[in-house]
Image (tube, coloured by chain):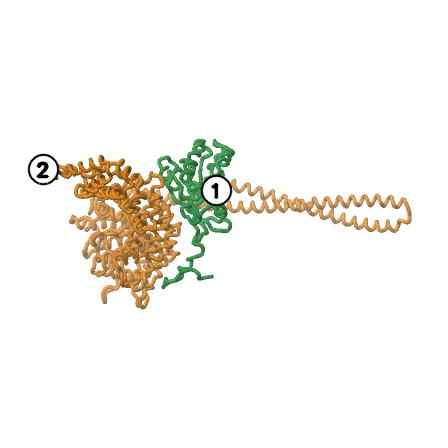
Amino acid sequence: MAYAYLFKYIIIGDTGVGKSCLLLQFTDKRFQPVHDLTIGVEFGARMITIDGKQIKLQIWDTAGQESFRSITRSYYRGAAGALLVYDITRRDTFNHLTTWLEDARQHSNSNMVIMLIGNKSDLESRREVKKEEGEAFAREHGLIFMETSAKTASNVEEAFINTAKEIYEKIQEGVFDINNEANGIKIGPQHAATNSSLAGGQGGQQAGGGCC
Amino acid sequence: MNFFRGVMGGQPAGPQPSGADTIQKLCDRVASSTLLEDRRDAVRALKSLSKKYRMEVGTQAMDHLIHILQTDRSDSEILGYALDTLYNIICSDEEEEPDKDKIKVLIVSLYIHVFWSDLSVYLCLLTALLKSQCAQVQGIILVSPMGVSRLMDLLADSREVIRNDGLLLLQQLTKGNAAIQKIVAFENAFERLLDIITEEGTSDGGIVVEDCLLLLLNLLKNNSSNQNFFKEGSYIQRMKPWFEVGDDNSGWSAQKVTNLHLMLQLVRVMVSPVNSPGATASCQKSMFQCGLLQQLCTILMATGVPADILTETINTVSEVIRGSQVNQDYFASVNAPSNPPRPAIVVLLMSMVNERQPFVLRCAVLYCFQCFLYKNQKGQGEIVATLLPSTIDANSISAGQLLCGGLFSADSLSNWCAAVALGHALQDNLTQKEQLLRVQLATSLGKPPVSLLQQCTNILSQGSKVQTRVGLLMLLCTWMSNCPIAVTHFLHNQENVPFLTAQISENLGEDERLVQGLCALLLGICIYYNDNSLENYTKEKLKQLIEKRIGKENFVEKLGFITKHELYSRAAQKPQPAFSTPEHMLFDHEFTKLVKELEGFITKAVHKSSEEDKKEEEVKKTLEQHDSIVTQYKELIREQDSQINELKEQVSLLSSQKDQMQSAITQQLSQIQQHKDQYNILKLKLGKDSGQSDGGQQVNGLQLEELTLLREELEELRRQHTLLNTQLTDKDKLISSLVSTATYSPAQSVKY
């Protein structure tokens, strides 16, 4: 499928906050209740539409465990967006946000869009972190904020799409250097090279200009 | 040990200084000389000794050399010597292990000097380090921040030498380390490598293309995350042009063969049967959609393709179509460009049953045929149909004909392949198992035709080669398992059971053990899938026969010969038939699954007494009865459920109607009230007017007329009102009756 832009995301945050579940809900529209530790990183992808343009999201879901930290750090530099996730039912995961943020800021490119996510919003009765606290933290550090539930799919689409919107706006503003792939952004092949499958025999000339 | 031998053994008796002594002296000079020239000379001398006395230089000079790398970085000459020396030391195939810290220091110091000295030497050095100390160096690079990312930048280096050295380094770096493989992929390795391959002219490119492909293989093999990324990044589509090999296949350089081979392997990695079914299916789909499969089929049918490439292409096509209905259908429609055009399947089968074709090619064709039929009922039906009397076309060679020819040819390999291939046409397909029973063969002139089943058992009893008999027995087992009619057909021939019992009970040599095991399996199938329709060969009678002629224990032991065979477990591992020699061609992968499934059942069935059998039969029957009762009730409940739903809908419809009516009535009531008021006002007015003057008579007369009109209207409205009222009560009644039925029905269903 042709796309206008490709954005690379990473998902970071403490272990067990629901990073993999968010990804699974976003790419496969399903929820897996059993916690299966992510080893290193896992990859997922999906196409979305913003402003009438097809945008491909490539998402790397990282392991939250401390032992994988050095591995997952390698992914910061090449990402255009990051979802920083905590669990609203576990205060410690909220307390660790500063460390995560420092780590991300240190290793990523300065334009990386970071979305703060308070996950497990369906577990209202066990809530330990107020929504206002999340909002305040986001405001203080210049992040976008959202509470989601990977279980009920509430706000999951929005979290990924709003991050993409922010990146898209930054591109329009000219903040990102889109020709440098190291920023985690790539311009799509646009309309080129889609009709080559019809040309059976000689594959000699195939350059542009067929339809226009 | 090596160290000691090097030091002790190399010691000459005379006054000449030993290697170790010289090295010690040089080390001292490196460490203590204040003049750069002196240190430089010493390192150069060490370098010259480092090949001959690798161990000695390594153990004695390593620290000094690393020190030099750190302190003398400004002098490129001495750095070069030191690096060369280190390279010589590390490039060793000896098992001696330098410790991790030293490696770390080495890498770090080397890294600091990357921009100072010769980058190419640095890369070679690191590659060499990786080769000898793979896991340790991988670990060090992985935890160093941006370590892998920096190395990835090498692929974008404008200097070709550096890029190529970088390729070799990454090849070593990514070996067997999934975490590094993923980071390398994240750093756009796929994009870069595919670009390089295209720039270098794909398969016509040189060794650089080969290096790129090897690196791609490292990144994708057994790494589902990277495979997913590769697929999602639409890189499969970019592989298609690789296989656009022209029609004049005259010049196939050795490099081109190697490159294409790796390209085909790369396709196979993406659709390997060991991957998760979902992942393989989606890759298969995009390979068809982008035309990759079609391109591969073109190579398959092209002329002049080296046998090696052809074989691998067949294997690749096999895995691209395996279990994918769309791709299998496409494959069935491919024709060879012969005159008249023949289906590709037929052309391939011709090679399979042709003794002069290379063994690996024949194996590949068998694999292709198996993959074509895997989970493909339609394809199975088409193959079996070519054998049925009604559809035989005498004018052209069909798949069925070739298989039968192979089954009964003099070449045991052809027998085996054809038997296994035909077995795959029956796999999990009861209809085709029954259809195949209809096949009749004309043997020789003047004799009546023989059924295919009969012919198989005839050949079996003639005592041909082990490979032939194994093939036929596997075919019979596959055919008769789960198919009581086939069992009956088999038992119908009076000679078959005595033949089997004789085979099993005899005390035969080592080579015959597998055949005995398979005979036991076949007899077991005759018991397990027996519908007791032949009086002489009921389950019970066959079991008695085993007890009398063979003995239960003996039978079970013989049955166990199959799984105990040394080649069994290897075949059970993966679907592709891979045999080191033609003689090893004995087990088929699907068949091993069947054995695994049946062995336990048959053992149980043989051990069970007739009473247990009967009991079980009864239990089965009652269970079935229960099942049917449950399904009856389920249906009833379903019916009632739909009834309730209908009624509910009706109720809601009626109540909404009722609401409408009610609002109409209230409207009309208020209208009536208005009219009444008007009427009263008019009446009052009339009274006043008549009392006041006579001049207003005319006006009053008019009012009177109006009055009667209004009265009539009022009357009309009243009538309407009563009518609506009665309608309303009707509806109310209906609703209440429906509500009562609705509440009654669920109660009814709960009862069951």
Circle 1 residues within 10 Å: few <14, some 14–19, many ≥20? many
Write down the chain letter for disc 1: A
Residue ID for mark 2: B15
Residue at the far right in the pictured view: B694
Answer yes or no: are tags 2 and 1 on the same subunit. no
Q: Residue at x 32, y 42 (%)?
A: B615
* Image height of B330 relative to B551, above or below: below
Residue B381 horizontal/vertical position (percent): 34, 58
Mark 2 or mark 1, whichever is nearer to me: 2
Helix, strand, or loop for circle 2? Answer: loop
Give the image quarter of residue A43: top left
Q: Which chain is green?
A: A
Q: Which chain is orange?
A: B
Relative to B550, A21 lies left or right: right
Q: Residue A159 got which mark?
A: 1
Q: Residue B579 got which mark?
A: none
| Image quarter in which the N terminus of chain B is found | top left
Q: Nearer the viewer, residue B643 or B187?
A: B187
Residue B626 shows in the view: no
Circle 2 residues within 10 Å: few <14, some 14–19, many ≥20? few
